[in-house]
Image: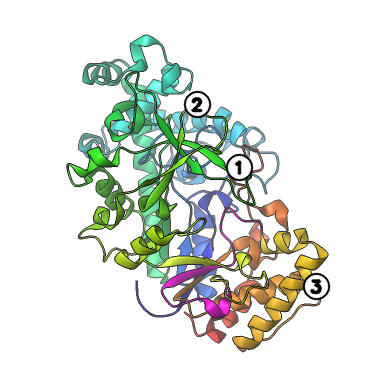
Amino acid sequence: MENKRKAGVLLHISSLPSAHGIGTLGKEAYKFVDFLAESKMSYWQILPLNVTSYGDSPYQSPSSTGLNYYFIDLDTLVDKGLLKEEEIDDSKLYIDETRVNYGMLFNSRISILEKAFSRFDKQDRDFLKFEEEGKYRDFAFYMTLKILNDYRPHYQWSEHYRHYSKELEEEIILTHHDTYLFYVWTQYEFLLEYNKLISYAHSKGISIIGDMPLYLAYDSLEFYKYPDLFLVDNDYKPTLVAGCPPDYFAPKGQLWGNPIYDWQSMEKDGYSWFRKRLMNNFEHFDVLRIDHFRGLAAYYTIKYGAEDAVIGKWVKGPGSKLFDGLLDLPIIAEDLGFIDDEARKLLKETKYPGMKVLEFAFDGDETNEHKPSNCQENYFCYTGTHDNMSLVGYISSLSKEGLETLAKDVESECKKLNVEFKGDNIKELAFSITILALNTACRTAILPMQDILLSGNETRMNTPSILSDKNWVYRIKKEDLNSELSSKLANMVVNSKRG
């Protein structure tokens, strides 16, 4: 990553205003790249590209490699002659164009993709080569098994399928070859469209920041086929799962439920699986944010089967040796939450930039590390993340006392950074905070699209540790991306000496 001051926008592909129920890799994605370029932005930050499953979270995927086939653009498939326009029935794909309906997509979009695949030339030379390389063999095999078992998690499958073997894999791929090939094709088509989009972004001076979840889901290909990567008992059940200890915001802690890696076993071959996973992500992204980076210094463990995260234990992680020889990679360390000396040591040893979030900054404490005037160069500054309320929503949620403290703090920070303060109403306060983010000393400032649009809390992307049909569904409208807004953003970026 260059030392030049830059700015970017956080918006997941699913949130784009594409047709047919969810954002895709089609023409609206190209228009968004144009919008970023016109706004003098340097980065487009997205969330994990992984296939989603129960709960719709890209951070709880059935595969660390499987790419989200919902992002395949249906209009592109029409242009390729694989679909007919009349075969796309939008009434079965969404109700509200500003909200993703994952249930409708699950019930209808896959069958549309299957129709397109039925017309695809399966003897296409490039596809045959792609399939032979086997990079997405595991994913296609596991998805085939999911279908055979009514999409249930692997630990609920019948005895014949419950335990992996090489013989079972060969049997499934041979006897259900069309289903297996369909899922290989989803990855092939995704990458054709995605790589073309990324090339276009690069031609416009836009780099892509991706995201890699630290943990994997219990119901995942990796746990099913490679249980030795995890701490398991004799019945191949997790012994420990991940989460966070209780704090002010979560009195019972956060119980994520992800199985814990067997780091000691991984160390024997130099953490080859994890390092390979890391490099696979760099095939898709220019910069990579590692979620819950502090879990590599020390991680919180909870006994499998516990109802909450109240009783748990901190365990030392692999630390910086996980990144031996990889310290020059453009990685962002998500260092939010409980940060202790071990986590700070890991950040110092790797020298990866961490994160500052201004939504955490305005509490009246002059020493708050997230305060704009306290932000340092080797950090990425955000107004908020995908797990936060929108700025407008956050400010609106404050008590009268909290609002007064925030307004006073924001005004003080504006004076320190020599930027104009506006604070007559909630939206003006939110706008002042976005200006502060751009004017910090941080190398890069990232603005969530919700904060650029000064949207309310109905646009929140995710509320952590809560299973809800309100999570991961946010979408923008076509009219949101207009020349007036891009011109305004360009002036903000230039005035903050970024771009």
Q: Which one is closest to the eye, mark 1 or mark 2?
A: 2
Where does residue 165 sit, x and y in percent of width and height?
25, 19
In the rendered structure, find residue 244 and report the number of the disc placed on it: none
Circle 1: element type:
loop
The residue type indicated by label 3 comes to Asn
Q: Main secondary structure of the magenta part?
A: loop
Q: Which one is closest to the eye, mark 3 or mark 2?
A: 2
Answer with mark 3 or mark 1, whichever residue precedes in sequence.
1
Residue placed under numbered mark 2 in the picture: 305
Residue placed under numbered mark 1 in the picture: 21
Residue 286 in view (yes/no):
no
State left or right for residue 308 relative to residue 444.
Answer: right
Residue placed under numbered mark 3 in the picture: 425
Answer with mark 3 or mark 2, whichever residue precedes in sequence.
2
Where does residue 263 sit, x and y in percent of width and height?
29, 42
Where does residue 328 sit, x and y in percent of width and height?
26, 66
Q: Is residue 376 magenta?
A: yes
Q: Residue at x 38, y 42 (%)?
A: 189
Q: How much space separates mark 3 and mark 2, taking CA atoms? A: 47 Å
Circle 2: element type:
loop
Q: Which residues are magenta?
A: 371-389
CB under 8 Å between discs 3 and 2? no
CB under 8 Å between discs 3 and 1? no
**What is the crowding at mark 2: few (fewer than 14 residues within 10 Å), some, or many (at least 20)?**
few
- Nearer to me, 277 or 305: 305
> Where on the picture, by quarter, is residue 123?
top left
- Nearer to me, 232 or 147: 232
**What is the crowding at mark 1: few (fewer than 14 residues within 10 Å), some, or many (at least 20)?**
many
Circle 3: element type:
loop
Answer with mark 1 or mark 2, whichever residue precedes in sequence.
1
Q: Is residue 384 magenta?
A: yes
